[in-house]
Amino acid sequence: MLTLNAVTHLTKIFNKCLSSLHFPDAWKRAHVLMFPKPNQNHKLPDSYRPISLLSNIGKLYEKLLLNRIKVHCEDNRIIPYEQFGFKEKHSCTHQLLRVTNTIIHGFNVKHYTGGVFLDVRKAFDRMWHHGLIAKMITAKFPDYLISIIHSFLTNRTFQVRVNQILSNVGVIQAGTPQGSSLIPTLYNIYNSDFPSNQTIMNCLFADDTAILTQGSNIKFIINSLQAQLLEIEKWCTQWRVAISTEKTKAILFRKGHSNKSMKQLTLFDEQLTWEPQVKYLGLILDNKLTFRQHTKYNSDKFWNKVHLIIPLIGRRSCLSLRNKVLLFKQVLRPILTNAAQIWRLTAKSHRKEMQILQSKILRIMTNAPWFVRNEVIHNDLQIENIETHIKDLSRKFFNNIVDHSNPLISNQVDFAHNP
């Protein structure tokens, strides 16, 4: 904890920075550590993951600025309700609930739901500084905040550290500083005027963007999506946002319908393929919303993680059983139950697969003999079965959205069951 004398000096420094509309250069220099990505050619620069270390005092100053920026955003509703990323009490699961609710409603009324899931290329690395300042001016942020943010973004430098050796100083020409607490909110401001219209539902979570539309006629769906894609093209061109057309996918959700011989959508003169499934915010959505592929994906991901930590939880581990259970609850089980509030309505056989995985790993952790029933192991470890755990997660989740401040979330209380 800082002494009163230190707090007093910091307060004077921050007040001086505010009055002079300045973000000191010393706080804008990053030390970059390079961590190799697994199973990559480490002779290539792209095979490393850079981690930037920034000044701690600079981070405190950023927090001060962030509070003032958030107040202006909330008072003037700068960031649209559709944007769920980097917002308090908003999560991926909330946005997924909104998406799946819309699709299931279409199933219930025998409508098609068409969607395009956009892949924004290096959204944070390519954010146009002058464009952000222009949007802050349009949003009528106080002049002093605009000036300080301009100072914050310009003249940023970095040095790469390898062991104890620092590289020459490099200048950051574009993009946003990694590790800064300001950047998520600044990105939301930059993305706040993303094209919208009454026939399209925008689903935004930071740079993970999806557009959906619904109707009884496939031609209407395609025309609506194509018209919106043209508007998105114009917006991206104006604000220097790059979309990867290779990774952007289109899908038509409809019970018993084939995606064959449908007119192709285009984006930046490139055709988008109609896919039988897409992955959005970690959840695999197939065109009939069975979640069959997502269950398999979760299972594979679960076993990959098990193989990594088996020395800690296996039969030969020296960890106590209590610590093994803690690892299971904190590391492994969340993989099995990721977005379970959404896919809990999947076929019972899929949920049973999750229970089998849980039972197998608990037997490994306890080194239980073959004749000991799984129910006994669960009771001894005080771990509920996967079905009960998912119900508890769902109950808490839906109870918390009833009085949510975002109407797009509070309106999702009545989860539509998949017929």
Image (cartoon, helix red, strand yellow):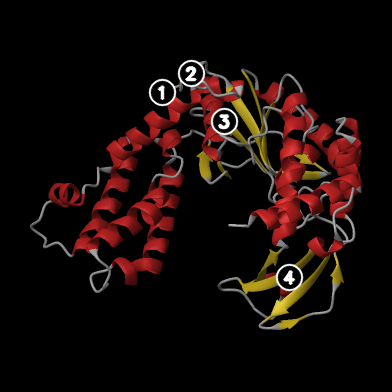
Secondary structure under badge 1?
loop
Residue type, mark 4 in image: His
The answer to whether residue 93 is left or right of residue 336 is right
Q: In the rendered image, which residue does mark 2 sit on?
A: 108
Instruction: Tell me which label, 3 or 2, sits earlier in the chain.
Output: 3
Front position among marks 1 and 3: 3
Secondary structure under badge 3?
helix
Rendered image: mark on residue 31: 4
Q: Label 4 vs label 2: CA separation? A: 54 Å
The answer to whether residue 189 is left or right of residue 327 is right
**278 vs 155: above or below:** above
The reply to whether dot 4 and dot 2 touch (C-beta < 8 Å) is: no
Residue type, mark 3 in image: Val
Rendered image: mark on residue 99: 3
Front position among marks 3 and 2: 3
The structure residue drawn at horizontal position 83% and vertical position 32%, both measured from the top left corner, is: 231
Residue type, mark 1 in image: Pro
Whether residue 121 is visible = no
**245 vs 300: above or below:** above
Front position among marks 4 and 2: 4
The structure residue drawn at horizontal position 32% and vertical position 56%, both measured from the top left corner, is: 326
Whether residue 218 is visible = yes
Instruction: Tell me which label, 1 or 2, sits earlier in the chain.
Output: 2
Secondary structure under badge 2?
helix
The answer to whether residue 14 is left or right of residue 352 is right
Instruction: Tell me which label, 4 or 3, sits earlier in the chain.
Output: 4
Residue type, mark 2 in image: Asn
